Image (cartoon, rainbow, N blue to C red):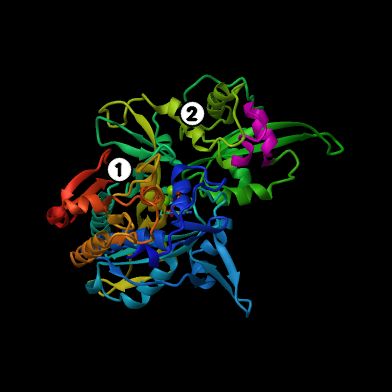
Amino acid sequence: MKASQFLISTLKEAPADAEIVSHKLMMRAGLIKRLGAGIYNYMPMGLRVIRKVEAIIREEMGRAGSIEMLMPVVQPAELWQETGRFDKMGPELLRVKDRHGRDFIIQPTSEEVITDVARQELRSYKQLPKNLYHIQTKFRDERRPRFGLMRGREFTMKDAYSFDRDVESAGKSYDAMFGAYCKIFDRLGLEYRAVAADTGAIGGDRSHEFQVIAETGEDAIVYCPTSSYAANIELAEALAPSAPRGAASQALTLTPTPGKSTCADVADLLGLPLTQTVKSLVLATDTLDDKGVVTGTQIWLLLVRGDHELNEVKAGKVKGLKGGFRFATAGEIDGAFGCKPGYLGPIGIKGVKIVADRTVAAMSDFVCGANQLDHHYTGANWGRDLPEPDLVADIRNVVAGEPSPDGQGVLAIQRGIEVGHVFYLGKKYSEAMNATFLAEDGKPRHFEMGCYGIGVTRLLGAAIEQGHDERGIIWPVSMAPFEVVICPIGMDRSELVREQALKLYEELKAAGVDVLLDDRGERPGAMFADWELVGVPLRVVLGDRGLKEGLAEVQGRRDAQASNVALAELLAQVQ
Ligand code: ATP
Ligand code: MG
Ligand code: MG
Ligand code: MG
């Protein structure tokens, strides 16, 4: 590629809404351009990176026996009604109508469609196991789209689905995907950790998230540095053997509503199943006088289990119930925690995570988590824009240093970016959609399924969080938009430079190197700054003086200094 023919749109300054380094650098390097909240144009430079990631994913998925297909972005609601997710999924699911008033959804994932394909195409056990995947646009109407491609609303995901005849075989499919994911993230040059994640209603221990280690990550990982134990924080909390830590709270005194004092009671009132992941809600109860005037308010931290969005919807329904529960307002939440107005409020009900024990039932027992927060925040000068991960740091105080569940050391906490997720689904979807195959005994049987996602576009952000310096992005070679950039100095003035630059460019191209020739005629400083910002791993500078001695100047993006390389050896060195 010649730079003069390409679209390069680097910026001096990142836009104000870019909070974290990867978002800033992606905008400055012209990889993406914002079109709306959580919606981005993938610019030519960014698309090259995406395509490289996709190519590695395709290769490794193929090696692991997965077959590529493509499912539509717009999917009929009927399929989603079969599994109940059309109603259950809450506002993250984008629903649309066509001109006839028929309901459709924009896919956030594709279990329904693939199960529909399987129930039609996979008829016999002889066709199993099968693993199908696609790399397709997803839409999730995220509550808080942010950090550029990291939490977009429209994004690209690779999602694969396995179909097996029995649990044992499904386990093998799961392991194959787990292995493929390790290879993919290894090849992408990322520092990551596979952590155990909650399996919710499905049960079992087959759910792992692949977390790229980064301080800006929205997730927290609990791990043991001296053993292989690693879990996401929700799972670690849920399985914590001891009661909540910390003294009972003074800051937040919960006066139970008469007769409705336990978590189970409240969950019951909201109609929530207490069977899944522990999540927190901040609710309020108003004390009303005879005329219905509010005379006082209590703030409740409610730990519930189950689908978060569902909880919100249900909690919303009890709004206004006399003496019942409603969402605490932003101001009330800040007040209860002694925070500056606006600190916790925007984070809303999702922001407060409290460490708790599964077995604890009384509401007052949950307050210790609040006490930790209170201890941390009271008087502290918290600004309005502190990012949510700071809350994770509080959980860190609570759990780090505890003995690891495997008895092999003590726990540590770090933050991560979830870039992949493998999940054993069992018969959840095959039963809901009656997807069966004929087993060896001639009887129909439901498929054992697994689903396996990779956040293709999120990976760009994750890689930059790990690879950057003050000058810009430092891509792993496998992801870089170009592997080598040739920067000729004075190409318009010197025939020698021009001739050698074009020659090298052609040679590298012929050798299969992904090379860019910067023939824009920019001054050296501007040229170098651009490619350091974009993060091209290797730069070759050709100048009149060096060329006369048969030398080129070569510098790796991570190198402190350039070195002179004889032109004759250049090709061998660069490849
Ligand atoms: P998160 O916890 O970050 O919301 P998730 O658990 O909802 O992610 P999955 O349903 O497991 O996501 O989807 C598979 C992968 O898709 C995730 O591991 C992540 O890499 C990616 N992904 C999910 N949501 C987004 C998003 N809003 N923007 C970019 N990538 C995403
Ligand atoms: Mg999500
Ligand atoms: Mg997740
Ligand atoms: Mg996930």
Can you say which quadrant of the picture contains the C terminus?
A: bottom left
Query: Residue farthest to the right?
Result: 291
- Report the span colored magenta: 326-348
Local packing at callout 1 (Cα closer than 10 Å; few below 14, some 14-19, many 20+) is some
Residue 9 forms part of the magenta stretch: no
| Percent x, y of residue 478 | 27, 54
Disc number placed over residue 419 in the picture, else none: none
Local packing at callout 2 (Cα closer than 10 Å; few below 14, some 14-19, many 20+) is many
Does residue 43 lie above or below 313 as drawn?
below
Q: Residue at x 45, y 56 (%)?
A: 30
Report the residue marked by disc 2. Answer: 394
Report the residue marked by disc 1. Answer: 191
Residue 336 forms part of the magenta stretch: yes
Q: Residue at x 46, y 54 (%)?
A: 10
Q: Nearer the viewer, residue 447 or 574?
A: 574
Q: Which kind of residue does numbered mark 2 sit on? A: Asp
